[in-house]
Amino acid sequence: MLLKTKKLMKAFGGLKAINKVDFELPANEIRGIIGPNGSGKSTFFNLVSGVYEPDPGSYIEFDGNDITNEPPHKVGELGLARTFQLLRLYQDMSVINNVMSGYHTLVPYSFIDAVTGRKKIWDQEKTIKEEMMELLSFVGLADYAELNASELSGGQRRLLVLARAIAGKPKLLMLDEPAAGLSPVNVDNLMKILMRLKEKYGLTLIIIEHILKVVMDTCSKVTVLDHGEKIAEGTPTQIKDDNAVIEAYLGKKMDDEEMRKALAV
Amino acid sequence: MGKFKEIIRQYPFLGFVIAFIILMLVPSVFFTDLYQSHLASLICINIIVAAGLNIVKGFCGQVTVGHVGIYAVGSYTAGCMFLYLGSGLWLTLPAAILIAGLFGVAFAIPSFRLEGPYLALATLGGGEAIRLFIENGDFFMSTYGISNIPQPEIFGVPFDTPDKYYYIAMPIMLIAIYFSFSVLRSSVGRAFMAVREDPISAAASGINVKKHKMLAFVLSAMFAGGAGAVYAHLPPGYIHPNNYTVIEMVTFLAMVVFGGLGHIWGGIIGAIIITIVYDLTRPLYEYQLFIFGLTIVLTILFMPKGIGGFIDKYFIDRRFKTKTGAASK
């Protein structure tokens, strides 16, 4: 198992944002996480990536390491990358610098090398830059490399966030609503790029998404959260027909009689 | 010309050697009296402080208003080492850098929990506390100040007049700039910027936010400490607590802001311009703080990236246009 949580818990005051979630994810899978707003999807991401500290009794394991109480940068170093719902781009940095800072953990030279400014650093920086330019052209942003990230359009920003997360060559990539706010054409484009990246870098993916088409088309398995609890898990077709899921998220199934009553009011 | 540029890019050290030779020739060509040399040394010192301040403020985004306190620590380390041990610049400079670095650690700790204006208040308190501690300490000669701090000698040649001291201050400045360039153009500089832009997503990329804040504070404190020591030995070798007030801090901030926050050349350009303006407006002493405060406000309002921003924008626009043929806004 690449990622495993046991009895994952997080309470904010009296609200149990995540309540005893057991989650297992084998390598090379694409997993979707769905659930209504406030069901704890993003909290789950924040717990796994170390942004929040889980409540006592929880256990999180990533790639054989116990990361339950590790700070976020340690989790990042181990090869777990994520994106944020609010993107959190480095607005005032150039596009290429955005991506290159995603490469941080793999930079081969030491701090002392950097301070003394030896020539070998410039050579290594050049190679890193070339590699990152390749990644940028892969997502289609190579022409914008020198522009500030704040000058990109909404769709381009989502691609840049993706590129930045992948720059560090992670084993697991967690995407928090990658397609939110995109037009249908852009959603398709994003998903195409995502699938190509997955193949190229051998990624394992977890995707939170409200656009069900994306989840149903791309994910091999789906986990459904509601009020901080895992209420279902299975293949997209199983999930579609699961009564608990339908009630919590997709909307209640009505028979003809009920429908007539509801419309009559 | 293009080939020359490529060589400089490959061997940045060569660029500094050329700059050194040019700057060595400047006094004999341009300077007409001793005062101009004195001002040139002062510019060199201010450039060191501004380059350091640019690391922590411009690149790492930590608002510190206590830097003048660390500058004072550097100066008084040098002053006290002369007073009690009789040391010269070659001993006091490394000592000042080291001790200022330790103070940098102390200034970094509040930044782990405080942000923006709150951090500014905390560091302002720290800087002022250092000044008041010096002013009221007999060990530091309190309000008498320390005088007759000697100028260094090289192979028995004393550098004891302003025109000669320039040849001490200038190379030290070049070395400082070289270090700041090396750091800021490497992955460390990028990590600083990432911490400035968004600490949470920086951490998600595996950047240790606390470590980099600490690094930025310590590095920039070392710059300020070194500059303080060079200032202490500047002829006539006199330091007084009044040289390290909030007014000086505002001037340092004005340099960095005016030159362009987060722009490598920014602090340097700003330091040159502001030091000269500061000197020209000396007759208007009462209004100086007003002038520099206003400069900061107007710069932030009308050109938030300072002069450096303009330069950057020009080059990037040109490159972007040639690449895509697009009309840039």
Image (cartoon, helix red, strand yellow):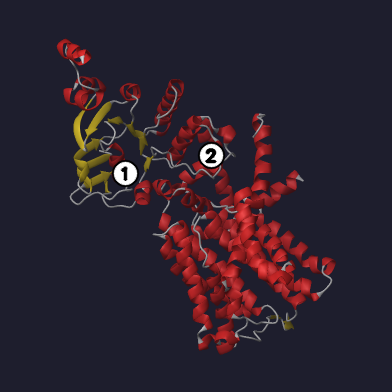
The quadrant the N terminus of chain A occupies is top left
Task: Let me know if residue B264 appears in the view.
Answer: no
| Pointer 2 local density, CA inside 10 Å: few below 14, some 14–19, many at least 20 | some
- Taking the image as shown, residue B192 lies to the left or right of residue B291, namely left
Label 2 SS: helix
Amino acid residing under circle 1: Asn
Q: Position of residue A63 (x, y in %)?
A: 29, 43
Label 1 SS: helix
Going by the picture, which residue comes out furthest to the front? A265
The structure residue drawn at horizontal position 67% and vertical position 29%, both measured from the top left corner, is B325
The quadrant the C terminus of chain A occupies is top left
Residue under label 2, please give it. A150
Q: Is residue B203 above or below residue B176?
A: above
Q: Earlier in the sequence, mark 1 or mark 2?
A: 1
Give the chain of mark 2.
A
The structure residue drawn at horizontal position 67% and vertical position 51%, both measured from the top left corner, is B307
- Taking the image as shown, residue B57 lies to the left or right of residue B298, namely left
Total numbered badges shown on the rendered structure: 2
Quote the CA–CA distance across marks 1 and 2.
25 Å
Residue under label 1, please give it. A46
The structure residue drawn at horizontal position 66% and vertical position 82%, both measured from the top left corner, is B237
